Image (spheres, grey):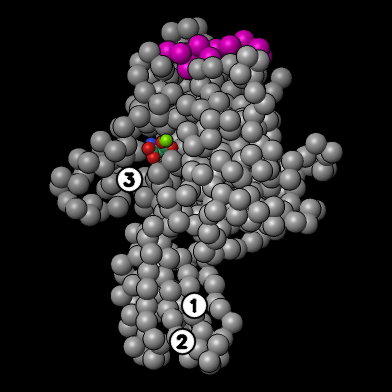
Amino acid sequence: MALIVQKFGGTSVGSIERIEQVAEKVQKFRENGDDIVVVVSAMSGETNRLIGLAKQISEQPVPRELDVMVSTGEQVTIALLAMALIKRGVPAVSYTGNQVRILTDSSFTKARILQIDDQRLRADLKAGRVVVVAGFQGVDEHGNITTLGRGGSDTTGVALAAALKADECQIYTDVDGVYTTDPRVVPKAQRLDKITFEEMLEMASLGSKVLQIRSVEFAGKYNVPLRVLHSFQEGPGTLITTDEEESMEQPIISGIAFNRDEAKLTIRGVPDNPGVAFKILGPISAANIEVDMIVQNIAHDNTTDFTFTVHRNDYLSAMRVLENTAREIGAREVIGDTDIAKVSIVGVGMRSHAGVASRMFEALAKEGINIQMISTSEIKVSVVIEEKYLELAVRALHTAFELDAPARQGE
Ligand code: ASP
Ligand code: MG
């Protein structure tokens, strides 16, 4: 008998019909003898609708009151699901985050979980009840309702699994697992049976949107086996787990991630003195702008060029800051480019293989794709390229690293 935490996202509980289907699914697990804690999101679109209401009152709603309101989305779905289970003869009880006592800090709209009281849940499980918990919400030490940030129900699921030492946390969603890359870009992308927390974290922070990043961090930290599955299709999904013994079959690269969220800024002809990088990036971080990739060239004629990327939303403000800096330090010019994309190959397998980066560069060269910036870490190589080549690059890399699904018979 296992203890399983099952989280169902907004589309999986998006209508009464779907909630009934989820209840049926939970019932089956229950009949197998497993103890089940279910975490649900609000019905799809509901959180946005609620935020929309608040914005009609004020462009910047008071965060505490916003949380009081948006947390109601999940309060509706827990009750509906509990009703649907009880109707089927499955004893069930629903709780808000406050009722469980999912204690968070007081950062409204982006609270962090501090502690979970598992007493009540354990008593219900012992009495044979399915426990249905509202995702995305908690309560602070003063009794204020808090929410965990968009997509936060994943984190609730993982945190409950960690607190209850569950055997597995299953995240049910509208895809049947984690893929080697976005199947809309590469039709030959394959579902991964397994991926490590580290790899998943890279994939998620690089734009693969299957799981909320924070939930993956949490699962890794507490070593909660996490499985992504399709809500209404049968299948094993993808298991996210710790890095196991490297096996013979372990691929060098597990996946290819990409995003179009960044923009590039270059400051040219910077006098090459100690402290110059700080003079350039200090004001950027003081303006609360996060920098991703950084490249500084070898000096030539006592000046250097310095390039970095920021989120595209921050491009204009970063440009203004950098132009000021350029005047102050006597740099020649500032240029920028928003038509860029970042493509990354990710895999724990690359730790032990030399030549992964060169294989990547070769594949891009063959397609005539120019690399503008490069950065590497232990399990990732990222390049910045011109945005219009993004899809071509991802496809070429998918093939070069032998990630393409084998052709099916008749193809
Ligand atoms: N309902 C919340 C949202 O839409 C939390 C979640 O779905 O995970 O962001
Ligand atoms: Mg969601």
Q: What kind of element bears circle 3?
A: helix
Q: Position of residue 391 (x, y in %)?
A: 49, 43
State the mark number for residue 78. Answer: none
Residue at the disc numbered 2: 270
Mark nearer the viewer, 3 or 1: 1
Report the number of discs. 3
Residue 129 pos. (x, y %): 55, 18
Mark 3 Cα shell of 10 Å, populated few (<14), some (14-19), many (≥20): many
**Quarter of the render that holds ligand 1:** top left
Residue drawn at x 45%, y 56% is: 386
Question: At label 3, which amino acid type do we have?
Answer: Asp
Task: Specify the quadrant that holds the N terminus.
Answer: top right
Mark 3 / mark 1, whichever is N-terminal: 3
**Residue pictured at 60% horizontal, 63% vertical:** 375
Q: Which residue is mark 3?
A: 67
The vertical placement of 334 against 391, above or below, is: below
Find out whether the residues at labels 2 and 1 contact each other: C-beta distance under 8 Å.
Answer: yes
Residue position for label 1: 306
Calculate the distance from the C-alpha at mark 3 to the C-alpha at mark 1: 42 Å
Q: Inspect this view and state whether residue 338 appears.
A: yes
306 vs 380, left or right, is left
Main SS class of the magenta portion in the image: helix
Work out whether mark 2 precedes mark 1 in sequence or the reverse, and give the earlier one. 2
Q: Nearer the viewer, residue 375 or 368?
A: 368
Circle 1 — which element? Answer: strand
Q: CA distance from mark 2 to mark 1?
A: 8 Å
Quarter of the view holding residue 54: top left
Amino acid on which the number 2 mark rests in the picture: Val
Boundaries of the magenta span = 20-33
